[in-house]
Image (cartoon, rainbow, N blue to C red):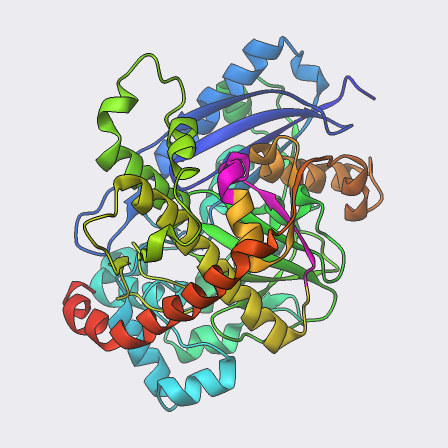
């Protein structure tokens, strides 16, 4: 069985990572390829779908060349991708415009229009649990209809990133359940929320047929197989969105188990057997496991804030050949700053926020700076700011859903930062567990979808046999009083500045 391999593609916001995994869960090699983003207007964030495909082709060929695995030994291809993509294609399969990505917040006006049809924002929130915002998919579909009517008329189907890659691979135009959740999905009926699309003025015939994560969509077409250097007919499975694959890869797949993903963005996810209501901007989605749900609160900027500091304040060090890893270098400096950053607080809302507060106008703020603060204080305050955001989500989860989450698995690139992990443990007062190869968790979760679909594993709980804990971090009680005090101030910053954020940034939406 060890000579059977799955190629899992983790297609993120800035790059694709192809991972060659055998059916015992061992990672043999990986390859990455970046692609650009475009901001033609303020608050827009687009990418060219052809760049995703080019990256998938290059990285597939790369892992095959590195591993010297034979094409006949590849038993499946599967994708896990960024959510909420909007890629209109016509009947011939031609892409009609760039992808309107999940980061894009152009449709604030359309969000308000839709909510007015339901009696306004307050009534809508009472009915649904959250307000619509300009980053949500249905308002952006209405934007497409209103602002680019020719594209809308020509569109046969709206595909997300995963659906687009499955189409390029197999020729089938479909959407998977977890991806459909980021649009509008009835968790009970396992169908599109057709009434809601129609009420918003969107033609639900433009929504593709639905499939599960474990379904075999088809085999690689002759063209796709040739591009990949694989065999025509190699099975392609439904896969899932990145949040859902991360939950599987973290091994937090049973009722009440939780994980945090720390990458460009961050989220806190909790697996749930029962469907939960949307509350405090946290959403209940279809899990990769067709029998489960996942409650997710997404914070828009996490690792991207750390990268911003590295690019703005550590430029010279990045060019120093004596510093092989800039983040390790920065970490050593952070360790010298006391917990609480001597009163400096950073709210990491560079891109607005989804959870614990939902806003397209909120922005990052440095609060309480004085002449004694250094760049190292700034760095630690960002670590702590993301941790405060996560604690805020944790508090909401306990109040809204009854989740206690005494142990949290952490995955993603940020999980490799030991200082950050200890800060999160101290701020949240939870035990933090970091998996081996935390950056591979999404790909491992996607591969599990294919492995269950192939019948190699009976169910998703089998992931617990494959995921191993590498590090544990326990809360340091001495640090909690200062973090508890600053956390209260952190929340008050948002409420104090909410109106001001809206006044200064609403013109950009």
Q: On screen, 423 above or below 225?
A: below
Residue 217 seen anywhere in this rendered image of the structure = no
Point out the stretch of residues depicted in magenta. Answer: 405-420
Q: Is residue 445 above or below residue 390?
A: above
Q: Considering depth in this image, is 201 or 183 the residue closer to the camera?
A: 183
Please report the residue visible at 67 percent of the width from the left and 68 percent of the height from the top: 403
- The residue at the point 45 percent across, 40 percent down is 12
In the image, residue 310 lies at what x, y percent? 30, 34
Q: Is residue 449 magenta?
A: no
Tell me, yes or no, if residue 477 can be seen here.
Answer: yes
Vertical side of 63 occupied by 375: above or below: below
Nearest the viewer among 281 and 426 is 426
Describe residue 489's horizontal placement relative to residue 415 as left or right. Answer: left
Judged left or right of residue 272, residue 135 is left
Measured as percent of width and height from the top left, residue 40 is found at 17, 48
Q: What residue sits 29% from the left and 60% below the top?
A: 105
Query: Where is 92 relative to 186, above or below?
Result: above
489 horizontally vs 289: left or right: left
> How many marks can you see?
0
Q: Which quarter of the figure is the C terminus placed in?
A: bottom left
Q: Quadrant of residue 52?
A: top left
| Viewer-closest of 262 and 95 | 262
Instruction: Between residue 153 and residue 69, name the one nearer to us.
Output: 69
Q: In which quarter of the image is residue 1?
A: top right
Queried whether the magenta region covers residue 412, the answer comes back as: yes
Q: Position of residue 302 (x, y in %)?
A: 41, 48
Instruction: Where is residue 66? Give x, y as percent.
Output: 56, 10
């Amino acid at each position: 069985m060890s000579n059977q391999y799955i190629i899992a593609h983790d297609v993120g916001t800035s790059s694709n990572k192809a991972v060659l995994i055998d059916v015992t869960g061992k990672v043999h090699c990986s390859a990455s390829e970046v692609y650009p983003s475009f901001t033609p207007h303020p608050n827009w964030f687009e990418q060219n779908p052809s760049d995703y495909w080019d990256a998938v082709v290059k990285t597939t060929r790369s892992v095959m060349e590195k591993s010297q695995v034979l094409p006949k030994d590849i038993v499946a291809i599967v994708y896990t991708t960024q959510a909420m993509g909007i890629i209109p294609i016509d009947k011939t399969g031609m892409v009609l415009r760039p992808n309107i990505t999940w980061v894009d917040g152009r449709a604030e006006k359309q969000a308000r229009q839709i909510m007015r049809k339901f009696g306004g924002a307050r009534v809508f929130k009472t009915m649904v649990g959250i307000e619509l915002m300009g980053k949500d998919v249905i308002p952006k579909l209405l934007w497409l209809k209103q602002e680019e009517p020719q594209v809308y008329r020509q569109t046969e189907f709206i595909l997300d990133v995963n659906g687009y890659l499955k189409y390029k691979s197999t020729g089938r135009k479909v959407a998977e359940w977890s991806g459909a959740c980021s649009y509008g999905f009835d968790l009970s009926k396992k169908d599109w929320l057709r009434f809601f699309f129609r009420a918003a003025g969107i033609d639900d015939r433009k929504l593709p047929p639905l499939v599960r994560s474990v379904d075999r969509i088809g085999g690689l077409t002759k063209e796709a197989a040739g591009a990949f250097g694989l065999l025509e007919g190699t099975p392609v499975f439904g896969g899932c969105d990145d949040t859902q694959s991360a939950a599987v890869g973290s091994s937090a797949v049973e009722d009440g188990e939780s994980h945090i993903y720390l990458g460009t963005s961050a989220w806190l996810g909790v697996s749930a057997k029962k469907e939960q209501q949307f509350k405090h901007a946290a959403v209940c989605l279809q899990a990769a496991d067709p029998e489960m749900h996942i409650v997710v609160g997404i914070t828009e900027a996490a690792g991207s804030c750390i990268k911003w500091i590295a690019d703005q304040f550590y430029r010279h060090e990045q060019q120093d050949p004596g510093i092989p890893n800039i983040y390790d270098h920065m970490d050593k400096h952070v360790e010298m700053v006391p917990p609480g950053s001597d009163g400096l607080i950073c709210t990491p809302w560079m891109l607005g926020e989804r959870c614990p507060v939902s806003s397209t106008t909120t922005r990052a703020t440095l609060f309480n700076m004085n002449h004694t603060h250094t760049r190292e204080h700034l760095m630690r305050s960002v670590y702590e700011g993301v941790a405060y955001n996560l604690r805020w989500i944790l508090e909401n989860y306990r109040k809204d859903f009854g989740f206690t989450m005494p142990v949290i698995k952490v995955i993603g690139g940020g999980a490799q930062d030991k200082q950050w992990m200890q800060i999160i443990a101290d701020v949240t007062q939870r035990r933090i567990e970091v998996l081996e190869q935390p950056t591979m968790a999404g790909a491992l979760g996607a591969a599990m979808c294919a492995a269950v679909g192939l019948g190699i594993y009976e169910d998703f709980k089998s992931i617990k046999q494959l995921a191993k804990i590498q590090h544990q971090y326990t809360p340091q009680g001495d640090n909690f009083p200062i973090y508890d005090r600053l956390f209260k101030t952190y929340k008050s910053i948002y409420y104090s500045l909410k109106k001001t954020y809206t006044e200064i940034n609403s013109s950009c939406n």
